Amino acid sequence: MRGPIDYIVVGFEGNNFDGSILSALTDAIDKGIIRLVDFAIVMRDEEDNVTKVSVADTGNELVMGFAEQYMPQEKLINDDDVEEVADLIEKNCAAGLLVIEQLWAKPLKEALINANGVLLAEGRIHPEAAEEIN
């Protein structure tokens, strides 16, 4: 049984992904909150060329160390996904695409199944939108 699978796309101006957010991601993985299913780094250069950047090509020790320890076995991100992400980023910008499994939700899912519960709807309210509700 799997937990919910989410994707997250995070943009970075100036093709300047330095890997510093990886400590928070590593922490969530190490605590068993999430599992990294797949990830990719997508860059759009000044000439509007789009590239899916390999971990080795980043030249960033943090990124390479993270990938060495947490590189997922599954490869779900394909060329169509890269193109969709590319449509979201401006020239001379980059984006990180993460596909994660919400491990914390697996016991809840199991309990709902065992209670004959049926998922009727789901969604996400981002914190910025939730502030508007109050």
Image: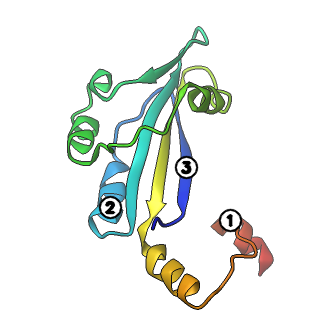
Residue at left offset 21%, top offset 47%? 69
Instruction: Tell me the distance, in whole angstroms, between the alpha carbons under discs 2 and 3.
Output: 15 Å
Dot 3 amino acid type: Ile
Counting from the top left corner in percent of width and height, residue 34 is at: 40, 63
Disc 2 secondary structure class: helix
For label 3, the crowd category at 10 Å Cα-Cα, with few meaning under 14, some 14 to 19 and many 20 or more, is few
Residue under pointer 1: 128
Residue under pointer 2: 29
Q: Earlier in the sequence, mark 1 or mark 3?
A: 3
Check residue 8 in the rendering and tell me which mark sits there, or answer none: 3
Residue at left offset 75%, top offset 76%? 120
For label 1, the crowd category at 10 Å Cα-Cα, with few meaning under 14, some 14 to 19 and many 20 or more, is few
The residue closer to the viewer here, 67 or 1, is 1
Visual colour scheme: rainbow
Residue at left offset 46%, top offset 65%? 2
Residue at left offset 55%, top offset 49%? 8
